[in-house]
Amino acid sequence: MRIFAFLLLSTILLYSCQSSTEKPSFAATSYFNTGDTGVRMAGIKMVPIQTPVGTFKVWTKRFGNNPTIKVLLLHGGPAAGHEYMECFESFFPEQGIEFYEYDQLGSSYADQPTDSSLWTTERFVEEVEQVRKALNLDKSNFYLLGHSWGGILALEYALKYQDNLKGLIISNMMASAPDYGKYADSVLAKQMDPKVLDTIHQLEKRGATSDPKYMELLTTHYYNQHICRLAEWPEPVNRAFKHLNGVIYTMMQGPSEFGISGRLANWDRKADLPKIKVPTLTIGGQFDTMDPEHMKWISTQVQKGSYLYCPKGSHMSMWDDQQTYMNGLIKFIRDVDGGK
């Protein structure tokens, strides 16, 4: 009888262990239960956007379900697309963070109208607000993360609609385009070979920025040092550059990341930073195209600011100083969610 009882108990315990490993945890079940009905679209939703020149659609993709943490990612460029931000897929799901990849109008999988009147910061802010409503994001859960140009857009959105936000993240972007230009000229340019820099400037003066030599010089002597420092650029980064809408990018930013000369050239919000009252994280990298000290300074000007420094990071610190970036970002989100 004792042997029988022992065998029965062993069988029960073995079955219990097998069942517990086969079944997803309650948290995992909840995270992946997005409530989708009908034909499932892998979380993709095309959001209609009303503009002064018509209605167009932008591309969004949802990951997970978390009622108190929903992060909307604003990519850079302008018009670079979401693809280089796919690295968040390797970190946010395991933390139970709901998030959305998003191609802004004119980018990658969104509609790409050609009316140049659409490419203004003010129009993009209204686009983000329409996306927020379509995705049912509100001040109880809505975190806005903007990288590079997306940081400009996130800051502009917060200055107009911060009552809709729970948290704001400005990643690798200064609060002043003129200051960004000065940093490129007075600091980063001096780190380059003078002959190379002179050739770049000569090509720019001649309007020959489409010359393959121009991009070759920038990539070798600037992008590999200050955009992404990994020896081999990740496939999602290369894919984003391949799909970049050069017309919009040049119109708003200028022909390269080496300074700024487009419609955004005079953008400056330094004086308005104290108006930002929501918890705000700024992120800067040691080798960034942006001045990391300026990003740190932003965190002291907003009402509830904190700063994340990536000592190995460049403009894409989420790639070349990934652990520092993601750990610090996740901690900020968790702290805000916990009321700290």
Image (tube, rainbow, N blue to C red):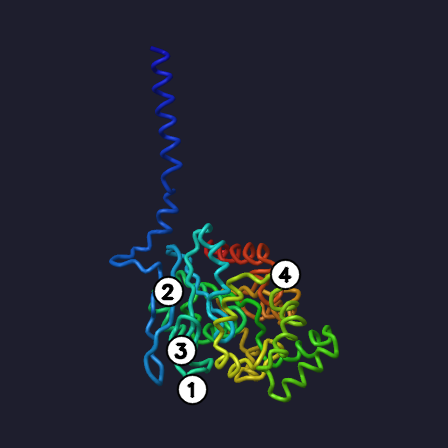
Q: Are marks 1 and 2 in contact (CB under 8 Å)?
A: no
Which residue shows up at 36% across the image and 11% down it? 2
The quadrant in which the N terminus is found is top left
Asked if residue 264 can be seen in this view, the reply is yes
Of the image marks 4 and 3, the number of the one nearer the N terminus: 3
Give the labeled residue for mark 3: 112
Kind of residue indicated by mark 1: Ser
Give residue 282's position: percent from left, percent from top.
56, 66
Of the image marks 4 and 1, the number of the one nearer the N terminus: 1
Give the labeled residue for mark 1: 117
Which residue shows up at 36% across the image and 51% down it? 32
Q: CA distance from mark 4 to mark 1?
A: 39 Å
Q: CA distance from mark 1 to mark 3?
A: 13 Å
Q: Which mark is residue 137?
A: 2
Give residue 338's position: percent from left, percent from top.
47, 53
Q: Are marks 4 and 3 in contact (CB under 8 Å)?
A: no
Residue 44: name its quadrant.
Answer: bottom left
